[in-house]
Image: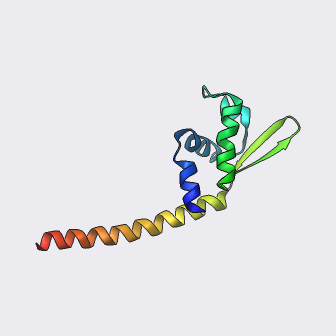
């Protein structure tokens, strides 16, 4: 699931949506307002983020409220920290090997 989340975050527009939602829940209209994107385009990006488990949306009347799922970001952060530790160790070993030769 984490790889699917990274794929969803790989798009600059979706990353900007996540960064905006990190400040708190908001409507789809408010997400679209500062961009040149149409509401249908924003909804497509939100659908990708929802499928990745990063965002939830709830329709209240005529307004669709979007909210970031904190638990999903914890999983991404945990995976990233493990990968960083793994690759730091490997690169340090490679650096030592290269210095010794």
Going by the image, does 67 lie left or right of 79? right
The structure residue drawn at horizontal position 71% and vertical position 30%, both measured from the top left corner, is 39
Q: In which quarter of the image is the C terminus?
A: bottom left
Q: Quadrant of residue 34?
A: top right
The structure residue drawn at horizontal position 63% and vertical position 60%, both measured from the top left corner, is 72
The structure residue drawn at horizontal position 53% and vertical position 62%, both measured from the top left corner, is 77
- From this viewpoint, which residue is outermost toward the right? 61
The image shows residue 9 at horizontal and vertical percentages of 55, 49
The image shows residue 93 at horizontal and vertical percentages of 26, 73
The image shows residue 1 at horizontal and vertical percentages of 61, 62
Q: Which of 9 and 67 is in front in this view?
A: 9
Q: Is residue 88 above or below residue 73?
A: below
Q: Quadrant of residue 6?
A: bottom right
Q: In this view, does 93 lie above or below 1?
A: below
The image shows residue 20 at horizontal and vertical percentages of 61, 41
Q: Which of 20 and 100 is in front in this view?
A: 100
Q: How many marks?
A: 0
């Amino acid at each position: 699931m984490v790889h699917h989340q990274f794929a969803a975050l790989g798009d600059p527009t979706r990353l900007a949506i996540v960064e905006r939602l990190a400040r708190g829940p908001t409507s789809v209209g408010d997400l679209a307002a500062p961009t040149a994107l149409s509401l249908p385009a924003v909804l497509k990006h939100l659908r990708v983020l929802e499928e990745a488990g990063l965002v939830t949306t709830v329709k209240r009347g005529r307004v669709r409220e979007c909210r970031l799922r904190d638990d999903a970001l914890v999983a991404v952060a945990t995976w990233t920290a493990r990968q960083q530790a793994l690759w730091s160790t490997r690169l340090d070993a490679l650096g030592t090997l290269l210095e010794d030769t």
